[in-house]
Image (cartoon, rainbow, N blue to C red):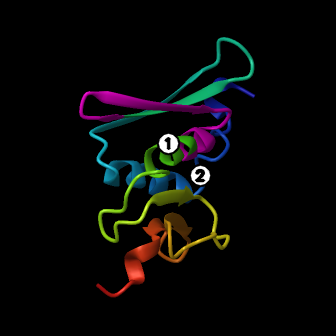
Amino acid sequence: MSPAAKAPPKGTDDPRMPAAVDLIGRSGAREFAIRYCEEVEPTVWIAQSRHGRAWTVAVALTPLGAVFNLCDDLIDGGQCQHCGRPTGFEPTTDPMPMPEHVCWYQWDPELATFRRGCAGDAP
């Protein structure tokens, strides 16, 4: 297979990828980049975001994994600016524990976004 005909990296066509990048922006990132290093095997993917002067970096063996790891680093342990609860990140639709105590940013396939747990709560 020629380099031009190479298949896209695993996960880049996943609808959660652009939603996760959007979530990184919603977390206050001023810059975002994803790149890889294939000088040695296995290829390592690096996702990075800049918040003010600080950079946050996460790595994985797939681009989607690197972006999810970055979301996890940025979201887990934060504080929801809407409900005040601690925040968590979950890329699946699985039920999460303690939703009354943790505002989970979780994949919503109908809206194709990562939705915060308190989004449907009345003020």
Which residue is the extreme one toward the front? 101
The residue to which callout 2 is attached is 13
Tell me residue 57's x, y (percent): 47, 30
Residue 56 magenta-drawn?
A: yes
Please report whichever mark, 2 or 1, sits nearer to the chain's N-terminal start: 2
Which mark is nearer the camera, 2 or 1? Answer: 1
Q: Secondary structure at mark 1?
A: helix
Tell me the crowding category of disc 1: few under 14, some 14 to 19, or many 20 or more residues within 10 angstroms, Cα based.
some
Tell me residue 90's x, y (percent): 58, 59
Tell me residue 97's x, y (percent): 63, 70
Q: Amino acid at mark 2?
A: Asp
Report the side of 73 relative to 51 (left or right): right
Query: What residue do we see at 44% from left, 60% from top?
Result: 86
Q: Amino acid at mark 1?
A: Asp
The residue to which callout 1 is attached is 73
Q: Quadrant of the N terminus?
A: top right
Tell me residue 78's x, y (percent): 41, 52
Q: Is residue 56 above or below residue 99?
A: above
Q: Is residue 31 above or below residue 35?
A: below
Query: What residue do we see at 59% from left, 71% from top?
Result: 98
Tell me the crowding category of disc 2: few under 14, some 14 to 19, or many 20 or more residues within 10 angstroms, Cα based.
few
| Mark 2 → mark 1, Cα distance in angstroms | 23 Å
Can you tell which quarter of the image residue 53 is in? top left
| Residue 116 numbered mark, or none | none
Which residue is the extreme one toward the left? 52
Can you tell which quarter of the image residue 52 is in? top left
Query: What residue do we see at 41% from left, 66% from top?
Result: 85
Give the residues in magenta.
50-68
